[in-house]
Image (tube, rainbow, N blue to C red):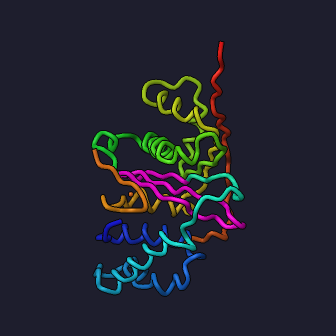
Amino acid sequence: MAETTEPIEVRSFVGLCGYYRRFIRGFAQIALPLFKLTEKKQKFDWNQDCETAFSGLKTALTTAPVLSYPMSSGQDFILDTDASDFATGSVLSQIQDGNEKPIAYFSKTMSKQERRYCITRKELLAVVQSVKHFHHYLYGTRFLIRTDHAALKWLMSFKHPEGQTARWLEILGTYTFEISHRPGRFHGNADGLSRRPCSDDCQHCTRTETGDIDRDGPMEFKTHKWKRKENRST
């Protein structure tokens, strides 16, 4: 993840970090210089304090106790996906010892053609790319996909898809998952990655060219079950 250059990028990055603030000791103090950059009428001045905070939070996101390993004793995987105007992003997580722990991050810059997609198509692209990227974790298991785009739930149950949508749904049909909608204010982890695609040399998530929320608030989840197609011999 490269140095941020705009207030909106700082806000997205802080949102991503804030999602896991309970695992980052001294989060509020570390992130203070970045919080100040997002204040109204605040002149954007990326100084050494900001760079130190940015580097410290990046390290926290990619090391224990934030980043974890998949555990056989943990619950099913959770895949949070999101799309911005120019990139897709996702976080693969698992509930371990009662806490949601990220396992891996993914982000990918859209091609020029993909940037012309409608928002629903971009969000479905994020799901397909993320599921394929984490295939080795997800294939043959049950998992939950969470999105802040409610229309995906309708699209997944579309009876007569055509063209590219049909091909994407065919890919997803080989997996077993539920899809759940949650409001964008609770979706800061995936949102931050879709707005900050990673640099080419990032060791913790993938980028390819042609990478402070309240977790204690009420959350409403609606799910759509999607079962993997079984191969049947005739």
- Residue at the spot x=58%, y=76% of the render? 23
Residue 146 screen position, x and y as percent: 59, 51
Image side of residue 81 versus residue 6, left or right: right
Residue 59 screen position, x and y as percent: 44, 74
- Residue at the spot x=66%, y=68% of the render? 217
Position above or below: 219 against 23: above
Whether 187 is among the magenta residues is no
Image side of residue 101 versus residue 32, left or right: right
Residue 186 screen position, x and y as percent: 58, 62
Q: In this view of the protein, which residue sits in the foreground, 159 or 136?
A: 136
How many marks the image carries: the answer is: 0
Q: Is residue 39 visible?
A: no
Residue 133 screen position, x and y as percent: 47, 46
Q: In this view of the protein, which residue sits in the foreground, 1 or 183?
A: 1
Q: In this view of the protein, which residue sits in the foreground, 136 or 11?
A: 136
Q: Is residue 101 visible?
A: yes
The residue lying furthest to the top in this view is 234
Which range is magenta? 80-108
Specify the quadrant of the image occupied by residue 94.
bottom right
Position above or below: 22 against 154: below
Image side of residue 201 versus residue 227, left or right: left
- Residue at the spot x=34%, y=41% of the render? 114
- In what quadrant of the picture does the C terminus appear? top right
Specify the quadrant of the image occupied by residue 95.
bottom right
- In what quadrant of the picture does the N terminus appear? bottom left
Whether 92 is among the magenta residues is yes
- Residue at the spot x=53%, y=85% of the render? 26
* Overall secondary structure of the magenta section: strand
Position above or below: 16 against 145: below
The residue lying furthest to the front in this view is 72
